[in-house]
Image: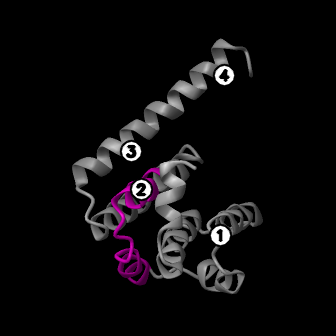
Amino acid sequence: MDKQFDSIMSMTDDAKVAYLKAFTRLASADGVFDDSEKAFIKDLAERYVVPSERLPEIFAADDNEKIIEDVKQIRNRRAALELIKELCFLAHADDELTDDETLFIGRVGQAMNIELEKIEQISNWVIDKIILAEEARIIFEEV
C-alpha cells in the first residue's frame, strides 16, 4: 500500500465524502459534469470504500462554501496534500486553468491548513509533470 492510499483510507467516511465532493465541484466547474467524470469519481469512491448510498450526495456537491467547510474534516496532512495534488491534475486536464478553479483549489487548501506557498509548489510540480509526460510522448514517438 502506498502512503496516499493509506492516508485516505485512515479518514472517516465523512472526510472521504468531503474529499470526493471537492472533485465533483472542480469537475463541474466548466458547467458540465459528464458521465466519464461521474464514473471516475464513482471508481474513487469504490476504491476508498465509501458507501454507495453517499454517491448522490457527492454528485450533488455544488455549494463552494459547504464544500470548503466539509474539507476542514480532512486533518491528515498527507491526505490534504494529495487532495490538492489531485485537484491540480484535474484542473489542468482540459489544458485550461480558470480563475475559478485556481481560487477553489486555494480555498480548499487553506481550509485544510495548507499554506498558499505549498499549494503553489504542488501546482508547479503538477505542471512540470504534465510537461515532462508530453515531452516523453514526443521523444518516444507516441503521437
Distance in Å between CA atoms under marks 4 and 3? 21 Å
Q: Position of residue 42 (x, y in %)?
A: 70, 69
N-terminal of the pair, mark 4 or mark 1, is 1
Q: Quadrant of residue 30?
A: bottom right
Q: Nearer the viewer, residue 89 or 3?
A: 3
Q: Nearer the viewer, mark 1 or mark 2?
A: 1
Which label belongs to residue 45?
1
**Residue located 32% across and 60% down the image:** 106
Question: Mark 3 highlights which residue?
Answer: 123
**Residue located 73% across and 15% down the image:** 141
Question: Mark 2 highlights which residue?
Answer: 84
Q: Nearer the viewer, mark 4 or mark 1?
A: 1
Distance in Å between CA atoms under marks 3 and 2? 8 Å
Q: Nearer the viewer, residue 57 or 2?
A: 2
Q: Are marks 4 and 2 in contact (CB under 8 Å)?
A: no
Q: Position of residue 58 (x, y in %)?
A: 60, 79
Question: Mark 4 highlights which residue?
Answer: 137
Label 3 residue SS: helix
For the stretch drawn in magenta, the main secondary structure is: helix
Distance in Å between CA atoms under marks 1 and 3? 24 Å
Q: Amino acid at mark 3?
A: Ser
Q: Quadrant of residue 67?
A: bottom left
Q: Amino acid at mark 2?
A: Ile
N-terminal of the pair, mark 1 or mark 3, is 1
Q: What segment carries the magenta color?
A: 64-85
Mark 3 crowdedness (10 Å alpha carbons): few <14, some 14-19, many ≥20: many
